Image: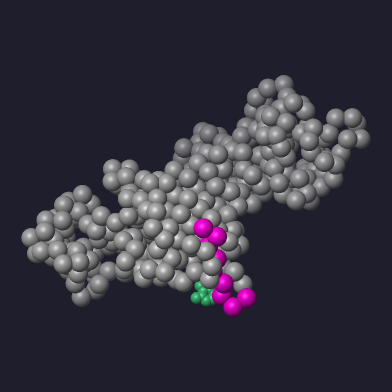
Amino acid sequence: MARIELRGLTRRFADTAAVDDLSLDVADGEFCVLVGPSGCGKTTTLRMLAGLEKASAGQVIVGGEDVTDLPAKDRNLAMVFQSYALYPHMSVEENIGFALKLSGRDRAGVAQAVKAAAERLEIGHLLARRPRELSGGQRQRVAVARCIVREPHAFLFDEPLSNLDARLRGQARVEISRLQAQLGVTTLYVTHDQVEAMTMAHRIVLMDGGRIRQAGPPMELYDPPADLFVAGFLGAPAMNLLPGLVDRSQGAPRFRAGSLQAPAPEAAPDGPATLGVRPEALSPVPLGPDDVAFPGQVLHVERLGAETVVQVLVEAGDALSVTARLPGSRAPSPGAPLTLHAPVSALHAFDAQGRRVEPGCARAFAAAG
Ligand code: ATP
């Protein structure tokens, strides 16, 4: 177990920087998730840390030791790939014990370590099988077992759940989180799935264009998000973002989009702005005297059982729709009129550059309201 420090890490391919001057500290025992859209540089960052990709500039420090110029095999980092990269001609037992055998551990020691890891992952009954005789979920467990036998400085995961179906993914999220907590191993986990990031991370690092956009505990990024990019990325369904204008023609700053109006934060500059509201903040019934109303017409209804996700075409300029998460008992009909309500304190404001209007837009909105 060790602290990981990335210092000004850069990787250029031809004249574009896939990772651009990235600095990040992962504390000993921390579960840190790198998340972001396709091509933002997550995998390249992980591969530079693992020693599988050479850095164009910067340093990689593991447990206080500068490993930038060390080959992958000398870094004592265990990596689980999307494909699991199991050796097809070896049994599960041989796959799990391979690295220990290479390191010169005696046969009895290897067998004991393999048995302990296999029991922990509940795959003890599969030791004689070959990878092709396993399900996707079982392969994933073998890949994780292969990591834990080595007692590495850190676990590196590259989209380990993307080959699993939705139900297994949910299970595997819980298993990996639990195992990481039990073992206390420093973990850097790459995914493009914001649900994995929200549910597994101690700290999320949201990347865009090779750089870090925002880093912090999941709920700090969720509310309040630093900018439009973060607001749009985290949350499913995503935050509703309504483009409009802030003006002070009637004294206090107001946000306007078509016939929609809302109080705007005192700090919001006049001109183009975006109003953000999370789907769960919208209610089909009024909540209080300073609610903002979103009158509209139901476009689409998805009944998920516990909740109903409704898309409503609102009278906010250019045919804008908002998505609301309603209780599962509600099922409005497509085409029906529906007014959604949100408390002023649940509204977020973003300026023309996409930055959240400070201080804490929820408070600022409330003060303006
Ligand atoms: P994804 O979620 O799709 O896996 P990612 O965030 O992991 O994406 P990377 O795989 O790190 O992104 O790629 C970052 C950028 O670097 C992309 O634009 C990619 O096309 C580019 N890139 C990665 N590897 C190479 C390479 N070997 N040669 C040229 N360009 C590369």
Task: Tell me: residue 124, above or below residue 20.
Answer: above
Residue 189 lies in quadrant: bottom left
Task: Tell me: residue 161, above or below residue 235.
Answer: below
Q: Residue at x 34, y 63 (%)?
A: 75
Q: Residue at x 55, y 60 (%)?
A: 8
Task: Tell me: residue 369, above or below residue 81.
Answer: above
Q: Is residue 6 left or right of residue 141?
A: right
Residue 351 lies in quadrant: top right
Q: Residue at x 67, y 34 (%)?
A: 360
Residue 127 lies in quadrant: bottom left
The secondary structure making up most of the magenta span is strand
Q: Residue at x 52, y 39 (%)?
A: 219
- Can the viewer see residue 122 in this picture? no
Q: Position of residue 335 (x, y in %)?
A: 68, 44
Tell which of 360 and 283 is nearer to you: 360
State the residue lying farthest toward the right.
Answer: 249
- Can the viewer see residue 64 in this picture? yes
- Is residue 318 one of those drawn in magenta? no
Q: Position of residue 150 (x, y in %)?
A: 24, 58
Q: Position of residue 21 (x, y in %)?
A: 58, 61
Tell which of 221 and 341 is nearer to you: 221
Q: Position of residue 49 (x, y in %)?
A: 43, 62
Task: Tell me: residue 130, above or below residue 116.
Answer: below
Quarter of the image that includes the C terminus: top right
Extent of the magenta region: 7-15
